[in-house]
Image (spheres, rainbow, N blue to C red):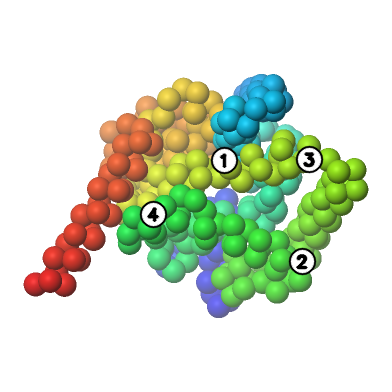
Amino acid sequence: MQGNASASYAGIGGIGSKIWPLTGPEIISRDTLKTLRMRSNGPGLLRLVVHLAALLLTGTLVYLASWTLWLQIPAMLLYGVVIVLLFAPLHECSHGTAFHSRWINHVVGFAVAAFTLRPFLYFKYRHAAHHTYTQHEDHDPDIVPFPTSMRDYFAQILGLSFWPKLIGTLWRGCTGRFTEEERTFLPESVFKTVMLEIRLLVVLYILIAAVSIYFGSTVALVYWLLPRIMGEPVLRAIRMAEHTGAEESPNLLANTRTTLANPVLRMLYWNMPFHAEHHLASSVPFHALQRLHDEVSPHLQCVSKGYVQVHREIIREVIGNRRRATAGQGA
């Protein structure tokens, strides 16, 4: 256990481990990497303003559509998608690359994490393990198993396992009863800090619920919780595309998928569709990933033209696997 934990901690800011020696970053020259790693507050602040403006615009649509249910539901869904895409700045802040200033990374990271019902510090350490053991069957805490059936596929899209995991994370963070897996990526030295953050989050959520009930207000429900839940399947679909169906090997050129998304999604998702590039050099800020893509694209082995194409391929393979399994049983 201790050996695995040490390897995980080494992955924070590093690349790979002894048991999962990741390959691929060697294709990037040191001079190129040095140039692309330059951090700045400007691009992150501009992108944050754009994201907040999108929240304000779609939230206003929810308000304007409040007089009729058949308009409010799609408005809430659109607003919810913008909310869940805040996962991107949370993710970027966890790497410390969204902004040059460390304190801005922390403040924005904590804020968007709380708004999306996630504990920032816990995510930071869990995500570091994901980068250390990308696509390792046993050690990558975020590995998404390939769907075994269409029922399993839709269960993953709807987040039927995501929500219990999230609630479980908050519960265990409050009680300090971390699982064995969590203890492999959470250093014991940060237990108390992680627990404090999660307890403060839970107190905040309880306080919001209590105030809402006391005043008979549905503001938090309509403009936060329901859209947050409604938008999650879109984020699940996007995150499935990042690794599902890619190689389960230490080769970052093949185990992570880049999706050539449209400019609007790239804007609101902070260039995270360039996901193979991000895994090849996680120290490169989001605003430089397009330039990194231009450098490494000839070497990438898993690139799709869009998220629809990715899921079409996944569904085709799921159906094909089921047919072959059925044919094998009948033989």
The amino acid at mark 3 is: Thr
**Dot in front, 3 or 4:** 3
Q: CA distance from mark 1 to mark 3?
A: 18 Å
- Mark found first going from the N terminus, 3 or 4: 4
* Residue of label 1: 231
Q: CA distance from mark 1 to mark 2?
A: 26 Å
- Report helix, strand or loop for mark 4: helix
Q: Is residue 119 above or below residue 262?
A: below
- Mark found first going from the N terminus, 4 or 2: 4
- Tell me what residue is drawn at x 32 percent, y 52 percent: 245
The amino acid at mark 2 is: Cys
- Mark found first going from the N terminus, 4 or 1: 4
Q: Position of residue 93 (x, y in %)?
A: 65, 41
- Report helix, strand or loop for mark 3: loop
* Residue of label 2: 174
- Mark found first going from the N terminus, 3 or 2: 2
- Image quarter where the N terminus lies is bottom right
Q: Position of residue 279 (x, y in %)?
A: 45, 45
- Mark found first going from the N terminus, 1 or 3: 3
Residue 275, by quadrant, is: top left
Q: Position of residue 249 (x, y in %)?
A: 33, 58
Q: CA distance from mark 4 to mark 2?
A: 32 Å
* Label 4 Cα crowd, 10 Å radius (few <14 / some 14-19 / many 20+): some
Q: CA distance from mark 3 to mark 4?
A: 33 Å
The reply to whether residue 259 is visible in this rendering is yes
Q: CA distance from mark 3 to mark 2?
A: 27 Å
* Residue of label 3: 218
* Residue of label 4: 153
The reply to whether residue 78 is visible in this rendering is no
Residue 327, by quadrant, is: bottom left
Residue 294, by quadrant, is: top left
The amino acid at mark 1 is: Gly
